[in-house]
Amino acid sequence: MRAMVYRGPYKVRVEEKDRPRIEHPNDAIVRVTVAAICGSDLHLYHGMMPDTRVGMTFGHEFIGVVEEVGSSVQNLKRGDRVMVPFNIFCGSCYFCVRGLYSNCHNVNPNATAVGGIYGYSHTSGGYDGGQSEYVRVPFADVGPTIIPEWLHQEDALMLTDALPTGYFGAQLGDIVEGDTVVVFGAGPVGLFAAKSSWLMGAGRVIVIDHLEYRLAKARSFAQAETYNFTEYKDIVVEMKKTTGFLGADVVIDAVGAEADGNLLQHITAAKLKLQGGSPIALNWAIDSVRKGGTVSVVGAYGPLFSAVKFGDAMNKGLTLRMNQCPVKRQWPRLFEHIQNGYLKPNDIVTHRIPLEQIAEGYHIFSAKLDDCIKPVIVVSAA
Ligand SMILES: NC(=O)c1ccc[n+]([C@@H]2O[C@H](COP(=O)([O-])OP(=O)(O)OC[C@H]3O[C@@H](n4cnc5c(N)ncnc54)[C@H](O)[C@@H]3O)[C@@H](O)[C@H]2O)c1
Ligand SMILES: [Zn+2]
Ligand SMILES: [Zn+2]
């Protein structure tokens, strides 16, 4: 089969690879129809995530058609059109029964923190992902769901990660009626977080980035006020000014470990590898929120991370909430919001790229060329 293969930082190719086989009675093999590239894939692509192995296929956002099921699979059959959450989870361990699907204890030999994620380095279990013609789906009775008839296939694809993660970011903010919410990052996750903040009662939503075209999308798609951080000497001071010098009630970090905005942090992190990444977006979040406020972190960070203003967070009495999104937990509510017309997830899709050209897709999305917000990879006919 044809699959995206990682060949080292900034090098991905489409190669011939063995088709995955059923390895366990509860596996399914899914023929992928469309996949997407996520901001998290860029951390792998840039060589920033530990234990990203050459030969690995990325892709944790995908939908497709069931090709084959293992002997104990009961809920799926060949031919079913399924959406697959990015988490691999067992559904029955201590963590899964508490809804912490992203922290499943049974799917990752390194399961002290994150559970399993498709195509996301060996720190997340080392599973091959869905930027590929076929993918092995473990615990097939637990994760995947048959795509409802009324759901557009690109909307289903956005529901495998970007939308639930943005929604989760707003949820972790514990927003109460009238709150001022600041979102750092106007990528897919930040855009969905901003949009979701309104659904949770925010009175004011502000989005911060340095890419003008994405801020324009934050205004049109998420009805947010926007700030380009390169236009201000200190974006934190600006946030103080606009919130009566108290700070925002809730700040959401939808940027993660590869934040721009501070040259020294960039050099020590990306160039010299002295820290696990740049903590600048997280530090801006800690500085921009009011005392006693909440910082919600959905931006991704590697296992070890440094130079975070943890003492300021402590002394401000902040609540810090964070996790990889437990995707399937968000689906029932998000289905309602989509059916009611409150959310139109595929509005953020800007590019549709054939699998064979995925290297170009990574380049465009990584370098933020051609006003790219969300690239969809077209793999096979639906
Ligand atoms: N927690 C989860 O379950 C989960 C799921 C999906 C994605 N993620 C993570 O969420 C983050 C965003 O994902 P995405 O797909 O939207 O990625 P993306 O790369 O498209 O978007 C990131 C945005 O942040 C902006 N940015 C960079 N530095 C900034 C700064 N200092 N302040 C404000 N904005 C800044 C960039 O210009 C870009 O627009 C990534 O770290 C990704 O790994 C986490
Ligand atoms: Zn993702
Ligand atoms: Zn589990």
Image (cartoon, rainbow, N blue to C red):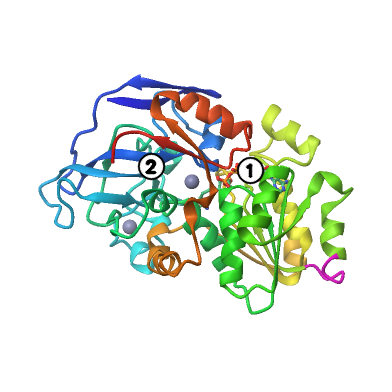
Q: Is residue 191 highlighted in magenta?
A: no
Image spot of residue 116 (x, y percent): 38, 47
The quarter of the rendered structure image containing the N terminus is top left
**Which residue type carries mark 2?**
Tyr
Compute the Cα span from label 2 to label 1.
20 Å
- Give the magenta part as a residue range: 242-247
Dividing the image into four equal quarters, which quarter contains ligand 3? Answer: bottom left
In what element is the residue under mark 1?
loop
Q: Which residue is mark 1?
A: 257
The residue located at (69%, 50%) in the rendering is 216
| Labels 2 and 1 touching (C-beta < 8 A) | no
Q: Is residue 344 left or right of 176 when viewed as pictured? A: left
Numbered disc total: 2
Residue 324 in the image: above or below residue 27: below
In this rendered view, identify the residue nearer to me: 320 or 137: 137
Q: Quadrant of residue 358?
A: top left
The image's mark for residue 280 is none
Kindly identify the residue that appears in the image at 17 percent across and 46 percent down.
Answer: 79
Q: Is residue 244 magenta?
A: yes
Q: Dominant secondary structure of the magenta stretch?
A: loop
Vertical comparison of 208 with 275: above or below: below
Q: Which residue is mark 2?
A: 118
Residue 47 visible here: no
Question: Which quadrant of the figure has residue 150?
Answer: bottom left
Mark earlier in primary sequence (2, 1): 2
> Residue 316: x and y, percent?
77, 68
> Three-letter amino acid code at disc 1?
Ala
Check disc 2: other Cα within 10 Å, few if <14, some if 14-19, many if 20+: many
As drawn, is 340 to the left or to the right of 22? right
- Outermost residue to the bottom: 177
Q: Quadrant of the C terminus?
A: top left
